Amino acid sequence: MSREFRTGIGYDSHRLELDRRLVLGGIEIPFPKGLAGHSDGDIILHALTDALLGAAGLGDIGQHFPPSDDQWRGAASTLFLEHARKLLEANSYQIVNVDVAVVIEKPKILPYRDRIRQHIAKTLGIDMERVGLKAKTAEGLGPVGAGEAAEAHAVATIAR
Ligand code: MG
């Protein structure tokens, strides 16, 4: 029996605002600004959740966790990723690998990269070498370059 492989893409962007916690990939990073949003604003986990749901054809994060629903106010986005994992498991999918590019001017993400990869790997129940993470800046261009926003792009490959 041959295996079926599927790929999904996810993208997210949030504004960076003063006096919010900066949570990226489930890890809190000390910085004067954090990502605005209904939940903790974790763009990495939002993009990743969408990539996984998309690969399986199971909708998107807004459908499963509507911003209009008050139960997700300030929610840890790890919950969203856990939910995607459970949905995939219920549909007999295994996660082959995920890869993320985060675009943020400041702070430097490199010192946190392996902790973030570890958190994602643990949440998804996969080895850390199956989790890629790159951090880029926008070279000063646009709202991301001005430090007013940050964005994340993710892909996921699943199989069953
Ligand atoms: Mg989001």
Image (cartoon, rainbow, N blue to C red):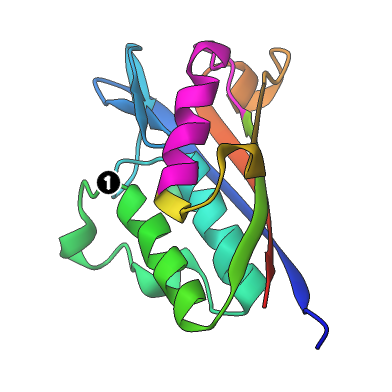
Question: Which range of residues does the magenta coloring cover?
Answer: 103-122
Q: Identify the image quadrant of residue 140.
A: top right
Instruction: Name the residue located 58 percent from the left edge and 23 percent from the top edge.
Output: 104
**Left or right of residue 53: residue 85:** left
Front position in the image: 131 or 16: 131
Q: Identify the image quadrant of residue 24.
A: top left
Instruction: Name the residue located 55 percent from the left edge and 81 percent from the top edge.
Output: 92
Q: Quadrant of the N terminus?
A: bottom right
* Residue 113 falls within the magenta-colored stretch: yes
Q: Residue furthest bottom?
A: 1
Seen in the picture, residue 34 relative to 108 is either above or below; the reply is below
Q: Local crowd at mark 1 within 10 Å, few (<14), some, or many (≥20)?
A: some
Instruction: Please tell me whether the stretch drawn in magenta is mainly helix, strand or loop.
Output: helix
* Residue 138 falls within the magenta-colored stretch: no
Front position in the image: 91 or 100: 91
**Left or right of residue 121: residue 100:** right
> Residue 94 at what x, y percent from top left?
59, 68
Three-letter code, disc 1: Ala
Residue that carries the numbered disc 1 in the rendered image: 76
Seen in the picture, residue 127 relative to 116 is either above or below; the reply is below
Q: Quadrant of the C terminus?
A: bottom right
